[in-house]
Amino acid sequence: MRRKAALASEKTYLRFRTQKRNNERSNDTLKRLAGIAALLDLAGILDRGSAERLRRAKREMDRRLRLSLGKTCVGMAGPQ
């Protein structure tokens, strides 16, 4: 794995250290704080009903996006 060094002020570094969880690598902490969630961070936060509603909403959003993109792409086809 390629490594990079980053400079941070003492105050910033101390804030970072307070956010670091036990047995968590610094890279994982940075990802979590940057909003790049690991699947394990999400496990168990929804009950079955909420999870199913979320799945349905995602499928509906995917369907709408495909329809919208299909209409946009047809208009962008240009001369054949």
Image: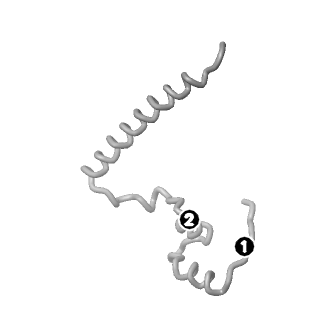
Occupied quadrant, residue 80: top right
Q: Residues within 10 Å of mark 2 (few under 14, many from 20)?
A: few
Q: Quadrant of residue 40?
A: bottom left
Instruction: Tell me the amino acid under the disc marked 2.
Output: Ala
* Residue 57 rendering spot, x and y as whole percentages: 34, 43
Q: Is 52 on the left or on the right of 7, as rendered?
A: left
For image coordinates 74% across by 65% down, the residue present is 3
Residue 24 placed where, x, y %?
A: 55, 72
Q: Residue furthest left?
A: 49
Q: What number is the disc on residue 6?
A: 1
Viewed as shown, does residue 46 lie left or right of 76? left
> 11 or 50, which lies in front?
11
Which colour style is shown? one colour
Residue 23 numbered mark, or none:
none
Q: Earlier in the sequence, mark 1 or mark 2?
A: 1
**Residue that appears at 61% across and 72% down:** 26
Looking at the picture, how far across and down is residue 25, in whole percent? 59, 71
Q: Is residue 35 above or below residue 48?
A: below
What residue is rendered at 46% in x and 31% in y? 68
Could you give the CA–CA distance between mark 1 and mark 2, rounded to whole angstroms?
15 Å
Vertical position of residue 75 compared to residue 58: above or below: above
Q: Looking at numbered disc 1 in the image, what kind of residue is underneath it?
A: Ala
Q: Quadrant of residue 56?
A: top left
Question: In the depicted view, which residue is nearer to us: 21 or 52?
Answer: 52
Q: Nearer the viewer, residue 56 or 65?
A: 65
User: Badge 1 local density, few (<14 within 10 Å), some, or many (20+)?
Assistant: few
The secondary structure type at the circle numbered 1 is loop
Residue receiving disc 2: 34
Q: Secondary structure at mark 2?
A: loop
Residue found 72% across the figure and 59% down from its top: 1
